[in-house]
Image: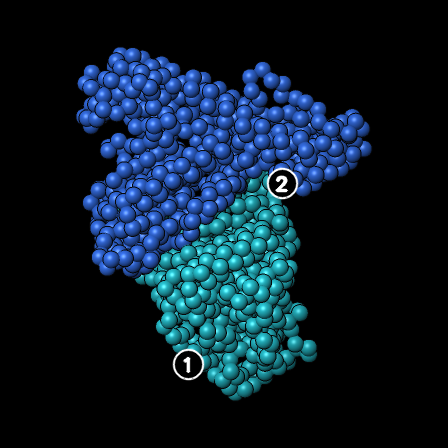
Chain colours: A blue, B cyan
Amino acid sequence: MGNDRGLTPQAEDFSAWYNEIVQQAELACHSQVRGCMVIRPYGYRIWELIQGALDGMFKATGHENAYFPLFLPKSALDREAEHVEGFAPEVAVVTHAGGAELEEPLVIRPTSEAIIWPILSDWIQSYRDLPVLLNQWANVVRWEMRTRPFLRTTEFLWQEGHTAHASQEEAEEETRRMLGVYRSFMEDWMAMPVVTGLKSESEKFAGAVRTYATEGLMKDNKALQAGTSHNLGQNFAKAFDVRYQTEDGEHEYVWSTSWGVSTRLIGALIMAHGDDMGLILPPRLAPVQVVIVPIWRNDDQKSIVLAAGEDIVSRLTEVDVRAKLDVREGMNPGAKYYDWERRGVPLRLEVGPRDVEAGQVMSVRRFTPDGEERKRPIQVESLVDEIPALLVRMQDELLAGARNRREASTVRGVESMDEFRSIVDGQGGFVFTGWCGDEECESRVKDETKATIRVIPDEEFRTDPAPTRCLCGAESRYEVVRAKAY
Amino acid sequence: MGNDRGLTPQAEDFSAWYNEIVQQAELACHSQVRGCMVIRPYGYRIWELIQGALDGMFKATGHENAYFPLFLPKSALDREAEHVEGFAPEVAVVTHAGGAELEEPLVIRPTSEAIIWPILSDWIQSYRDLPVLLNQWANVVRWEMRTRPFLRTTEFLWQEGHTAHASQEEAEEETRRMLGVYRSFMEDWMAMPVVTGLKSESEKFAGAVRTYATEGLMKDNKALQAGTSHNLGQNFAKAFDVRYQTEDGEHEYVWSTSWGVSTRLIGALIMAHGDDMGLILPPRLAPVQVVIVPIWRNDDQKSIVLAAGEDIVSRLTEVDVRAKLDVREGMNPGAKYYDWERRGVPLRLEVGPRDVEAGQVMSVRRFTPDGEERKRPIQVESLVDEIPALLVRMQDELLAGARNRREASTVRGVESMDEFRSIVDGQGGFVFTGWCGDEECESRVKDETKATIRVIPDEEFRTDPAPTRCLCGAESRYEVVRAKAY
């Protein structure tokens, strides 16, 4: 419950700050199994809100949910060459079950392409069966060496979309559509601006023709890959022999995509917005949007303010605001303020006996644009009008603030390795540079600076005029966004 | 999609009928891994509707969702003696991960008590931390020898509630409360009447003090255990040393419960209501509540009826009815009727050119009480009033019908083994008898007849006067419900 340990300032040790937030805001904790976390109720409620929003967007774009098994025979993983190379080293393997050794070991899904495609080969016969637009909410397991809550865990929760199409164009369109869905979700719900674009060959999904990603910038100016959308071409269709009969009676391999986001998004939320007081949650994803803290000195006052608090909760619930009255005993109001600030609740309403008499509450915002006053009294009568509007405004302000911060941490037109190195080792952030397109050059820059090519950005993010030189001095073929990343 | 293979009549081979429904209504299919099924979109949508309803009921009774890991160290399972004995033979074990052999093998959760309790020992310090009211939606794995889609699969989806309380009374109250939640859900949403009661010692959950269950009766007159709620006493608190400080400063072990229902409920839905035409879904859990089938002979008619169909879908969507227009080409209306009947859609609206002219549709119910006409024209203008009301009535009628069938298949006051055997081998159904309370007698009856004690029924289900003799002739201590079961 309440916790008055201090929080390490971000500027001092961002990583320590992150771990403390996860623990003190009761988002997650460690389990008995290395690298597996427990998602606590407050953290899981954020995930439920994320799921609800995304699931609605997936259904609105024609997708249906299904559920495929946790296990695949080891031989199935081996069917697509790049895919097995990418995933084989990090899978967990079941060798015994029901008290006996299995004839063929079973792999726990690290992702489900190799489970879904053998099934789709039964479901898809003709062009009439296409497109197939599926999504699955599931747990997956990847045996990671270095784990961090939400950002990289051995088991994690995610959604994985899997689709099959009659043409290359349709598959590409779907890949881009879902990238757009992710971007909208991240901006409109998470209040996190992202750069979208294409991954380089070395960073793409094992088995994909093209991987697109959304990249957010965290408050320590490191990038975080928040979602990916893969055009798989005919790779899996060929590996699992999934063909359909066209209108003309021909038999063609289908074209496919897959796309996913995970509980990593909670890590993104923490690091995109949090400050030295704690978590900052965008109103649309806050389990508690408004907390009401009653203030009393004696039992008479207590019954008055608690009744007023309950009345406010029901007024706000009526207009679909997630409101909670903090009735905890033996904890003073200051400690409650501190606790809810740590947990990132957007809005606090303080209710004392005088407020009740005056028919008002003191509202205190968790964050405001620079210089704006956090505190303001609001009449109880007008709460149902003002609070929903204020939450919408706060959501917008959070996005605008994050966008400004991202812009302030973006440098364009960098053409020399020295300048690049000094930015990366200094302020960090997104650095737009040219790239010759050579993989060796890409990996050399990565080795020297720890900064990687995040994406070849989509057109709207590109610099005009485009950079002419790569960091290596050769002619630039692509503009790229580079950054140190999670 | 459409499927015109016939369905084996229930009376001929209920088991074949079941398997064909699962396949032809596209609820599930087999995967590459023995005993693991794929839940197809239509089946998964039913599960989503089940989840939505139950989740709301859990939250309304104060529970929060969380997520605990898939794995537990083998040693943790061993901590509670009865629990390990019950589950050890059927677990799946991970011995290798990340390319190396693990120091300690990991068990994939068959249920999560042994994962959750070590964590709760950190969360619970004082009486202020109680009660802890958690629920988890998750996949679990139990290596079953004989599997059937939905009824018994190696991996299945479920929810598992886990709670901790300060007293025995509170734990018992919670166990009973959740049994009541399950019963309400099964009756109000699934339209499936259930008998509730206590399991005998031999049938209780491994590690529980008392297991309560809800038992439904399927259309082949076999019982199905649909949900269980366990009072775990202090068994897990002692095994994992979970104590709390009371208000008086004493240290006491907490009292706990767990309760769960699974994708087995979809099997229950199929077998509680289906008929020789196919699935019958209760309106509240039907992915499609109303299907609109347009009828045309030429392109002019086609554009008229499709426009009318779209208009009807938007009218119905407006009043929260899940409606779908079947626009499939190359399939005649009769085949569409057949297809949607197979899939259990409660209501069909047929729209031909003359109907459009007359401003009406022909409504056809999937099921009616005996003797009532299935077909009735409805004015388009009044659809938004009539359809929601009709769906409510159909939901009630389905429950009433199932209740009548259950009563007709229930025999009370059976005191002789001969009579018992002839009922069990004949019509089947629930048989209320006395029981001497002896475990050997219980298992002898089971061996001889394949019928088991389903529950010691709750008071409202008991016979008055109570039976005086057990089937063995000894004095009866408990009235019990016996049946052959899934």
User: Does the image show residue B348?
Assistant: no
x, y percentage for residue B45?
Answer: 47, 56
The residue where tag 2 is placed is A320
Kindly identify which chain the residue marked by label 2 belongs to: A
Which residue is located at x 49 percent, y 59 percent?
B304
Which residue is located at x 52 percent, y 58 percent?
B308
Q: Nearer the viewer, mark 1 or mark 2?
A: 2
- Give the secondary structure at mark 2: loop
- Give the secondary structure at mark 1: loop
The residue where tag 1 is placed is B12
Q: Amino acid at mark 1?
A: Glu
Q: CA distance from mark 1 to mark 2?
A: 53 Å
Disc 1 residue crowd, few under 14, some 14–19, many 20+, Cα 10 Å: few
Residue A385 located left or right of residue A408: right
x, y percentage for residue B46?
Answer: 48, 58
Residue reaching furthest to the front: B300
Which residue is located at x 68 percent, y 79 percent?
B465
User: Does the image show residue A479?
Assistant: yes
Tell me the tag on residue B300.
none
Q: Nearer the viewer, residue B178 or A58?
A: A58
Residue B233 located left or right of residue A385: left
x, y percentage for residue A332?
Answer: 67, 27
Work out whether A208 lies above or below B34: above
